[in-house]
Amino acid sequence: MIARLRALVLGAGALCLSGCVSLLPSADPSQLYRLDAAIAPVGGGTTAGSTFGLVLPAIGFARAASGDRILTVTGDEVAYIAGARWVAPASALFEEAVTRAFDANAGPARLVTRGELRTADSVMRLDMRRFEAVYDRGPNAPPVIVVRLRATLVSRGDRALIAEEIFEAQVRASDNRVGQIVAAFDAGTGEVLTQLVDWSNRIGAPRP
């Protein structure tokens, strides 16, 4: 009888604990999201021979945000949106977005593949410092998406530092729903990539 009562008490406690869990914002289980991150038109037309190549090593990414879960920050606490994931690790989606951004670039900067290393003039290192939804107005208000990227350009020949810059975008989600939060991630990433490509066109040209 005592054992039975103990089991009932434990079961009731488990139900109470489960009732305390709050998932904000709400999302359908296993819903997957892409990162489109279209960039604004940057650069001008190029003439033959005016382009220059950039080598892009593996991109550094904040560990907590690098996986396929969507990172949120509330004060000193971090959490992931339940039931919602990126379709692939965020670090991989961002790397694909960088490639698309330079493919669409009308300016002189071009990313080169490993087979084209001899044509590269500089090495561009990227480090994603923040990629998160920040609940700065409370858990029920739309969060602000923060995307912060550090870029460093180094001469491929002598490894001398050419330039370094930090690009940041903060975009407020239009609603505290996953779809709107992802749309803000898209917009923020697009802003940062637009800044990066424009900077690369201006700064990354080989020195005479």
Image (tube, rainbow, N blue to C red):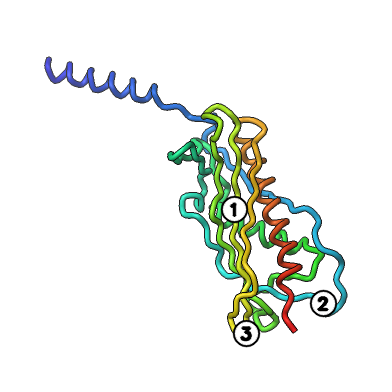
The tag on residue 85 is none
- Residue beneath disc 2: 50
- Is 200 left, or right, of 80 in this rendering? right
The residue under the point 66% across, 47% down is 188
Mark nearest the camera among 1 and 2 is 1
Give the Cα separation between the discs numbered 2 and 3.
19 Å
* Residue 48, above or below 62: below
Inspect the image, locate mark 2, and give the three-letter code of the amino acid beneath it: Ser
State left or right for residue 77 relative to residue 47: left
**Could you say which is closer to the camera, residue 51 or residue 33?**
51
What is the C-alpha distance between the residues marked 3 and 1?
A: 28 Å
Q: Residue at x 58, y 80 (%)?
A: 159
Q: Which residue is mark 3?
A: 157
Residue 79: x, y in percent? 46, 39
Pointer 3 or 1: first along the chain: 1
Q: Residue at x 53, y 29 (%)?
A: 138
In the rendered structure, which amino acid carries the disc numbered 3?
A: Gly
Residue denoted by label 1: 148
